[in-house]
Image (cartoon, rainbow, N blue to C red):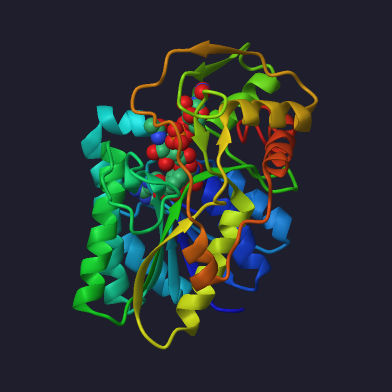
Amino acid sequence: MSGSVLVTGGAGYIGTHICVALIEAGFTVSVLDNYYNSNPVSLDRVAHITGQSLARIQGDVRDHKTLSDALQQSGATAVIHCAGLKAVSESVQEPLHYYDHNVVGTLRLLEAMAQCQVKTLIFSSSATVYGNPQFLPLTEEHPLAPTNPYGHSKLMVEKMLRDVFTADPSWRIGMLRYFNPVGAHPSGLIGEDPQGLPNNLLPFVAQVAIGRHPVLNIWGDDYDTPDGTGVRDYVHVTDLAKGHLCALQQLAASKTGHCTAINLGTGTGYSVLDVVRAFEQASGQSVPYRIMPRRPGDVATCFASPQLAQQLLGWQAQQDLLAMCTDAWRWQSDNPQGYTNAL
Ligand code: NAD
Ligand code: UD1
């Protein structure tokens, strides 16, 4: 595969893994990121893993000129749009901030793409657009009813993309709804580097295992699940990155335009206790935990139907929970403070 791809938010957790996959597949990659929630060291690591350089543009997706310059200079024929904010609780406190980065940022990007005649886009959407599951597994036809401003912002973007496609069906748009991305590149050089106290389970478990926190709080063990703790569809971030390659390939090969939402998950749910046990096995460390009350807004069980991804993209997640924990532990133990103080 060849061609030039612009990755917005490419210095972040998922973006770095997508950059590695793209470069290894033969693409020329440019990253546009304002480093709001990332560290440029992550891109040095991408270059180290791949043995190839990548163009970096420090800038904001809400800035039209930055975007059109980036598109023109990179000669990109496709954009993978990962830039955005993702913390649910913060989005409840600061909704306008979320609409600004996520919705306005995408609006500006679409304007610049239209102006530069770049009409192939993969958007980082989220299973959060479904809201509380009414049936399982979650298929793409499940009603869309997000329960917080972060989720609303993702759904607004999906609607905006559908409207853009209706007005101009030559666009090729993939909206990839990620379930729970976890794990890290097997090199241990790139991974998730949350700032402050992690909200999500895997990074918190990893930080307990490395000794940054004494104990994991498990939010509820009285759910209607096999062991009472919440069940989620964890998907290895390198599998997720490959899903973007498959989507790019399909969009490029297609004779017509598209605007399609596709789940990226494994189809298998694991409980919090399953994750704790797998992490202990992978790391050889103990992960002390205590049971706490349920976290407001959490659901008991959430997992994907991965069938459409298989059918349309030929993509299927390959890696199991133990591999996800093994790679997360390698990243955590090689980089106890993430990218902070890293060379
Ligand atoms: P991340 O925070 O690690 O990466 C996002 C990147 O976007 C960061 O490098 C950040 O600096 C950059 N960014 C933010 N606002 C920007 C702006 N206005 N202009 C330029 N750059 C900006 O997050 P991630 O986990 O890699 O997530 C990537 C995308 O996937 C996000 O859109 C997120 O909503 C979505 N997503 C993530 C998850 C998850 O669990 N990680 C799940 C579903 C969907
Ligand atoms: C969260 C977001 C969701 C986002 C997803 C991406 C919320 C309400 N939802 O979902 O929008 O798409 O991340 O990864 O924040 N848990 C603990 N202790 C912890 C942390 C988590 O027991 O310290 C439990 C949770 O109760 C849940 C499971 O672990 O059962 C997974 O939690 P988390 O990693 O935060 O992901 P989600 O809740 O699925």
Q: Measuring from the top left, give residue 11's x and y in whole percent.
A: 52, 49
Query: Which quadrant of the figure has residue 152?
Result: top left
Q: Is residue 230 or residue 252 the one in the foreground?
A: 230
- Left or right of 205 on screen, residue 148: left
Residue at the location (28% across, 42% down)? Answer: 146
Q: Residue furthest bottom?
A: 255
Q: Measuring from the top left, give residue 264's x and y in whole percent.
A: 50, 55
Query: Which quadrant of the figure has residue 115?
Result: bottom left
Q: Is 124 placed above or below 112 here?
A: above
- Left or right of 167 on screen, residue 74: right
- Left or right of 49 on screen, residue 134: left
Q: Is residue 125 or residue 139 the one in the foreground?
A: 139
Q: Is 213 placed above or below 21 here?
A: above
Quarter containing the N terminus: bottom right
Q: Measuring from the top left, give residue 123's x and y in whole percent.
A: 39, 60
Q: Is residue 300 or residue 233 the one in the foreground?
A: 300
